[in-house]
Amino acid sequence: MFSIISTMFLGIGIGYGLRNWTILQKTEKTISLTIFLLLFILGVSIGSNSLIVNNLGKFGWQAIILAVSGVLGSLLAARLVLQLFFKKGGKQ
């Protein structure tokens, strides 16, 4: 886990240092396409695994609750950050 977090922070540091390069400013679209491709491949690998598909009814509700809770928590946190740090003109 430490190596993954370290790699992420290294990428953030390099990206911050190279933020004025025009080639890096055009990577937004390719990053989104790459994420969609990875999610698709993840879905294909889950769908092709008979063990997961056969036990989906057993663990499906837990997965749905975790996913919905994660999304709602992220939305609430984003809203809180927006209100606390991105006020226009100092007043809301």
Image (spheres, helix red, strand yellow):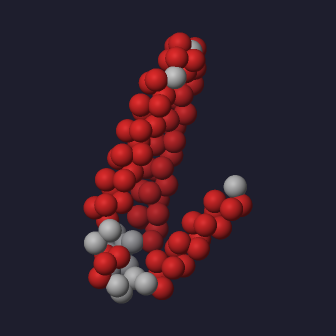
Residue 36 x, y percent position in the rendering: 35, 47
Closest to the observer, 71 or 90: 71
Q: Is residue 91 above or below residue 50?
A: below
Closest to the observer, 72 or 14: 14
Closest to the observer, 89 or 19: 19
The residue sitting at 31% across, 61% down in the picture is 30
Q: Is residue 86 above or below residue 37?
A: below
Residue 68 x, y percent position in the rendering: 47, 35
Q: Is residue 69 above or below residue 62?
A: below
The residue sitting at 51% across, 79% down in the picture is 14
Q: In screen coordinates, is 80 left or right of 8?
A: left
The residue sitting at 39% across, 51% down in the picture is 35
**Quadrant of the rendered image containing residue 83:** bottom left
Total number of numbered discs in the rendering: 0
Query: Can residue 17 be seen in this snapshot?
Result: yes
Query: Can residue 56 be seen in this snapshot?
Result: no
Q: Quadrant of the C terminus?
A: bottom left
Residue 56 x, y percent position in the rendering: 52, 17
Q: Quadrant of the N terminus?
A: bottom right
Q: In screen coordinates, is 78 left or right of 29?
A: right
Residue 5 x, y percent position in the rendering: 64, 62
Closest to the observer, 57 or 32: 32
The residue sitting at 41% across, 38% down in the picture is 41
